[in-house]
Image (tube, helix red, strand yellow):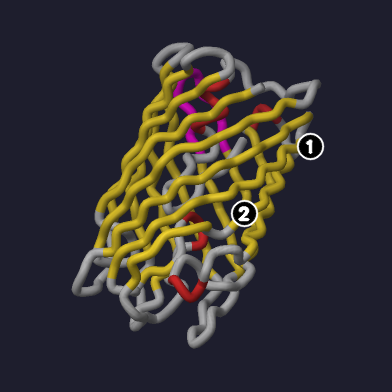
Amino acid sequence: MQNKFIKKAWLPAAAVALVAQPVLAEEEQGQWSFTSGIDYSTGDYGDEGDTDILFVPFSLGYSQGPWAAKVTVPWVQIKGPGSVIGGGDGGVVVGGAEAIDDSGLGDIWAQLTYSLESFPADYGYLDLVGKVKFPTADEDKGLGTGEFDYTLQVDYFKPLGKLTPMATVAYKIKGDPEGSELDNVFFLSAGADYRLNETINLGATLDWQDASSSASDDSLEIFNYLGYKVNDANLLTFYSYIGLSDGSPDIGGGIQWKYSF
């Protein structure tokens, strides 16, 4: 399984895996994948003006057996009062910053996933995930914090016929940007996926995350998606999300394309 970016650049843990293959079996031979898309969000995050974020990631992944690795290089555009910096999983609400209206290379992420083979399949599927954010975004432009971030994560899902409950628990270690101190945070997500047929699935999750600074509330969002398997190599997923707190964007959405080869 591949996990989503919290700012909704990617999707819930089980969503892509469930629509991409009828049977959740490990690949004996290695498989490459390329994933891209576009994500747009807007919201005031409790500030006087809205922050608009356009996020376009490009990911290259490789999986074999229980292991999967992925590197993501994004382009990000941010326009707002400066209360939010960065995009993707590295975006944080800091407050009190100068206005931002800029774009460029975002922070590069590397991810390694291990599907726990010792976990009994009768009880579901469990993945252990580690992620590292490399501070490649220009902090002077407000496109990133300029610091490394680390994430430790557990993804779980259990197929029950066409319905698959899924959950994610993560702990994120945040680097402190100049002039700010960020707290490490917990992230929790719970939801379900429903397979309509062999080509279409849909689902929704409720996502919560600690605030990383006193300038923000905890984030709480409802996320929903629809996946369409074009063929064995191509998967399209359309999604949207609604923020339920000042720590989240008011609304957002996007499209993701995954090509396996």
* Magenta run includes residue 249: no
Residue at numbered disc 1: 118
- The segment highlighted magenta reads 157-166
| Nearer-the-camera pick, 235 or 191 | 235
Q: Residues within 10 Å of mark 1 (few under 14, many from 20)?
A: few
Q: Is residue 111 above or below residue 174?
A: above
User: Which residue is at 38% across, 48% downward?
Assistant: 206
| Nearer-the-camera pick, 32 or 125 | 32
Q: Which mark is nearer the camera, 1 or 2? A: 2
* Magenta run includes residue 159: yes
- Does residue 210 appear in this view? no
Count of numbered labels shown in the rendering: 2
SS label for mark 1 = loop
User: Which residue is at 44% across, 71% downward?
Assistant: 141
Q: Can you say which quadrant of the picture contains the C terminus?
A: top right
Tag 2 or tag 1, which sits nearer the N-term?
2
User: Which residue is at 50% across, 23% downward?
Assistant: 235
User: What label sits on residue 109 in the rendered view?
Assistant: 2
Residue 78 locus on image (x, y percent): 36, 61
Task: Inspect the image, locate mark 2, and give the three-letter code of the amino acid beneath it.
Answer: Trp
